[in-house]
């Protein structure tokens, strides 16, 4: 069967299927099935999969899966290189246009809400110049009191931004505080001004919390068996600094602590599980705000067929 027309369906905007949800809920498996059925190509919506040689802990698609279905926005930079949401937005939009032009269905799949929404809606920020003195003051605050304390300051000024930024993401937390200080407005407020850029169908995956947390725990165990500790050790030996943003990712920080002898491997594993469960909860809170998402419980029978009907209804020309 020929591929879908490269002309966007409906209102002239490019098409985009978005699959979101918490970690370990089953986004990858579903996206591969839908990509095969609807001639799709997958764009990673994960802020940590952009880093090279960070494969196990970020749960990247396997080489075999990537051979079967083209994947984009993976392995873009070295772990010690800076990477911004603006860069992600630019590269993602270029990829979507390219995929659409070839008659394929662009599919963004992941759990980093800020990155995904920057692509689908965009955002506008006030023209606030960086204040070196303020940034230095905040860095010193975090050095003395810890990243959690800095994150708490943001939670007071902008609870919504704090909910979506990890406590160890100092750079973005300080920028959010800087914008609030200069404008009197929260970052989350000024980022809600963008309009929908694509003709989008949103699918959200969820499941009962007890089931999700069990899947999280088993996934962490599987990652350790696959060699996550060794992956972190290799990055450490290759000179990736401990304070790099990439090394604050789930699993990498804790494994680094184990390699330094600060905690045992068993303690590190439990820390990763606990932190990942909290992260999954934050992801759900973030995505629950978006009214356009159609939610599906992965534990319910018949939900995959409902998802297929939804996708076919929105993108009929792509179905085999």
Image (tube, grey):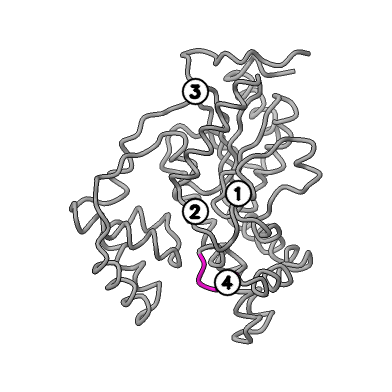
Majority SS type along the magenta span: loop
Is residue 43 on the magenta stretch? no
Estimate the spatial distance between the alpha carbons at disc 2 and disc 1, rounded to whole Å.
Answer: 9 Å
Please report whichever mark, 1 or 4, sits nearer to the chain's N-terminal start. Answer: 1
Residue under the point 58% across and 33% down: 95
Q: Which mark is residue 301?
A: none
CB within 8 Å, label 2 to label 4: no
**Mark 4 element type:** helix
Span highlighted in magenta in the image: 240-244
Image spot of residue 12 (x, y percent) = 48, 14
Image spot of residue 30 (x, y percent) = 69, 38
For residue 285, above or below residue 2: below
Nearer to us of marks 2 and 4 is: 2
Pick the front one: 83 or 33: 83
Residue under the point 79% across and 39% down: 67
* Residue of label 4: 253
Please report whichever mark, 2 or 3, sits nearer to the chain's N-terminal start. Answer: 2
* Residue of label 1: 76
Q: Along the horizontal axis of the image, is 72 left or right of 202?
A: right
Residue under the point 44% across and 63% down: 169
Estimate the spatial distance between the alpha carbons at disc 3 and disc 1, rounded to whole Å.
Answer: 26 Å
Estimate the spatial distance between the alpha carbons at disc 4 and disc 3, rounded to whole Å.
Answer: 38 Å
CB within 8 Å, label 2 to label 1: yes
Is residue 241 on the magenta stretch? yes
CB within 8 Å, label 4 to label 3: no
* Residue of label 2: 83
Image spot of residue 285 (x, y percent) = 45, 50
* Residue of label 3: 199
């Amino acid at each position: 069967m020929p591929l879908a027309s490269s002309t966007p369906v409906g209102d002239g905007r490019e098409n985009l299927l978005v699959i979101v949800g918490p970690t370990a809920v089953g986004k990858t498996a579903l996206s591969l099935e839908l990509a095969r059925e609807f001639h799709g190509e997958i764009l990673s919506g994960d802020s940590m999969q952009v880093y090279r040689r960070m494969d196990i802990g970020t749960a990247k698609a396997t080489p075999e899966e990537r051979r079967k279905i083209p994947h984009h926005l993976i392995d873009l930079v070295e772990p010690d290189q800076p990477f911004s949401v603006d860069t992600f937005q630019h590269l993602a939009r270029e990829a979507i246009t390219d995929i659409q032009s070839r008659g394929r269905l662009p599919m963004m799949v992941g759990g980093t809400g800020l990155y995904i929404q920057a692509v689908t809606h965009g955002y506008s920020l006030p023209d606030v110049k960086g204040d070196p003195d303020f940034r230095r003051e905040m860095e010193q605050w975090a050095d003395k009191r810890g990243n959690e304390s800095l994150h708490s300051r943001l939670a007071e000024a902008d609870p919504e931004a704090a909910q979506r930024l990890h406590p160890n993401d100092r750079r973005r937390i300080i920028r959010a505080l800087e914008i609030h200080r200069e404008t009197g407005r929260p970052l989350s407020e000024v980022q809600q001004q963008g309009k929908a850029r694509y003709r989008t169908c949103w699918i959200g995956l969820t499941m009962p919390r007890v089931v999700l947390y069990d899947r999280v725990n088993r996934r962490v165990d599987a990652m350790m068996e696959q060699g996550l500790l060794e992956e972190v050790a290799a990055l450490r030996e290759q000179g990736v600094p401990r304070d790099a943003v990439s090394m604050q990712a789930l699993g990498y920080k804790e494994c680094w602590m184990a390699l330094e002898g600060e905690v045992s491997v068993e303690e590190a594993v439990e820390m990763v599980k606990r932190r990942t469960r909290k992260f999954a909860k934050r992801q759900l809170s973030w995505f629950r705000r978006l009214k356009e998402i159609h939610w599906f419980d992965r534990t319910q029978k018949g939900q995959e067929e409902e998802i297929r009907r939804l996708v076919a209804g929105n993108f009929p020309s792509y179905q085999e």
